[in-house]
Amino acid sequence: MHYLLLAAETVTDKPLPVENWFFIKPFIWLFSQFMNGIMAVLDKGGIYSIPLCIVLFTIITKMLVLPMTIKQQKSTRLQAVMSPELQAIQKKYQGKTDMASRQKMMEEQQAIQEKYGTSTFASCLPTLIQMPILFSLYPVIYRMETYVSYLGVLKEKISPEQFTQMWQLFDLNLKNAPKSAEGFPLAWPVLIPLVVAGAQYLQTKLLMSKQAQPNMDNPMMSSMKIMNYTMPLMIGAFAINLPAFLGIYWAVQALVAMVQQIVINKFLDKKSVEELIKESRDKANKKRAKKGLPPISEKANISTRNLGKVKEETEDKAAKEEKVKAATEYYASRSAAPGSLAAKANMVRDYNERNKEGKK
């Protein structure tokens, strides 16, 4: 998303590529009206500050997508739970490229996803829905004087000095890049790209903390982990060379997202895995009912009832050795002399009796 800004000059009179996308234009108009409204409200209070407008605008737009963010986080947690099962299926069919094996693997993966009432694409869907919203925010911020008509009203209403002061943050005009500040990188504007990079990194770190641990044997997962470290640095570099109000927007956006993530984590942490799965499967069953499909089978309910408790189907080697040791000590405590024929007979008798009781 930030790559789109690479095609733009560091002046605000050149259109961004996204402005020509027909499905973006309605959102650009909507958010320009939000900004107009914010400026009108602040105007009534005699407040003329572009930085404050950006902060309020960012908070409002982030709250609009909060329901989709919560839905995405729920799906992410469910994927973290079912990821080991999906990886086990992939490992099971690793190296099998025939059509029958691939079809069988897809069927087993589908069964796992139905069991949890979600899919591997469930966490991606809210992001895709948010993409037009996120793309449309940049033109409104980047070319504010073009899209925010209330700026023209203020330009006629207040003095030129006041209008110029609107764009000031301390002694920096937000239309200029931080690197244009006198004495950069020792001047305070260097904090803008540093805060942007740091906030973006912490946001990513906080987001990834509740996701499935990446499988480092998977090259794609390794690349994603590298991107999580390099992208904040790249965005910080953009913030050095682009107008400072973009850096302000990125920093506030990341900080608001972090606060939202903390609140969402606390909200979801109160729910057990079983509750999240039940909610997800209930929603999935409603969708299936509308399509005339049967609900998820009861077998799936039973298999997910004790999630979070590791239960082995068969005893591992260590457990078996422990049982053998306990049995040996038990038999050794019998009255017959160790190693005698009677002791051996007692051991056989007791062993048979125990097996009979276990079968009952």
Image (cartoon, helix red, strand yellow):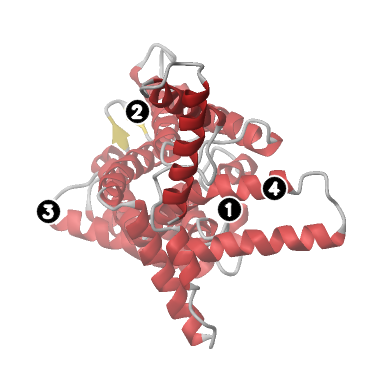
Q: Which residue is mark 3?
A: 45
Q: Which residue is mark 1?
A: 15
Which callout, 4 or 2, points at the residue further toward the start of the chain?
4
Label 1 near label 3: C-beta < 8 Å?
no
Residue 356 appears in view: yes
Q: Does 216 sit left or right of 162 as displayed? A: right
Which of the pair 51/133 is nearer the observer?
133
Report the disc number at residue 172.
2
**Closer to the camera: disc 3 or disc 4?**
4
As measured in the structure, the alpha-carbon distance from the residue carrying label 3 to the one carrying label 4 is 61 Å
**Closer to the camera: disc 4 or disc 2?**
4
Label 2 near label 1: C-beta < 8 Å?
no
**Closer to the camera: disc 1 or disc 4?**
4
Which callout, 1 or 2, points at the residue further toward the start of the chain?
1
Q: Does 63 sit left or right of 284 as displayed? A: left
In the rendered image of this protein, does residue 114 appear above or below residue 230?
Answer: below
Which of the pair 273/43 is nearer the observer?
273
Relative image position of residue 296 (x, y in whole percent): 49, 73
As measured in the structure, the alpha-carbon distance from the residue carrying label 1 to the one carrying label 2 is 24 Å
